[in-house]
Amino acid sequence: MGVPHAVGAVPIPLPCRLSAPPLLPGCHPKGKKVILVLASGGVFSEGPWKSWHSVEPYLRQILGFIGIEDVQTVWAEGMNIPPLAIHAVPNGEKAVVEARRNPG
């Protein structure tokens, strides 16, 4: 599922409706694992901008609301910072592969 992020608003095109139980047939999110792949132009996972990071906590809250508790996050960040940009996507790809290999 793709989740675009704009300043202060995250539209969530989830395959399940959140507001009206029961969920759609075949949509049983409890017990599922989610790997969040977050990309950004800056670095928000650590350093002075960490307090500005809001996407991951927000998505974890929404996923928890529908019963998904097993959430792992992978970052591809620094894409607008030339020394980091060269490695951002390859590092993110490696992290996704690693997350799929070693859950938790």
Image (spheres, rainbow, N blue to C red):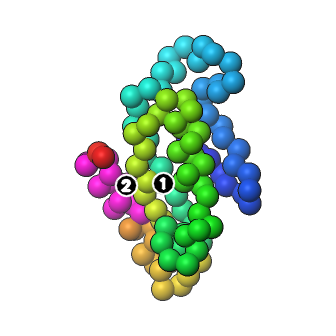
Of labels 2 and 1, earlier in sequence is 1
Question: Residue 11 location in percent, x, y?
Answer: 71, 44
User: Helix, strand or loop at disc 1?
Assistant: strand
Answer with the quarter of the image where residue 7 lies.
bottom right
> Quick check: can you spot residue 42?
no
Q: What's drawn in magenta, residue-wise?
A: 92-102
Q: Residues within 10 Å of mark 1 (few under 14, many from 20)?
A: some
Q: What residue would you read off at disc 1?
A: 37
Mark 2 residue type: Val
Residue furthest bottom in the image: 83
> Quick check: can you spot residue 16?
yes
Question: Is residue 44 found left or right of 90 in the rendered image?
Answer: right
Query: Which residue sits at x=59%, y=39%?
Result: 62
- Majority secondary structure in the magenta region: helix
Mark 1 residue type: Val
Which quadrant of the figure contains the N terminus?
A: top right
User: Helix, strand or loop at disc 2?
Assistant: helix
Compared with 24, 98 (above or below) is: below
Answer with the quarter of the image where residue 2 lies.
top right
Cα distance between the residues tagged 2 and 1 = 8 Å
Query: Which residue sits at x=54%, y=62%?
Result: 39
Residue 96 badge = 2
Question: Residue 92 location in percent, x, y?
Answer: 42, 63
Q: Are marks 2 and 1 in contact (CB under 8 Å)?
A: yes
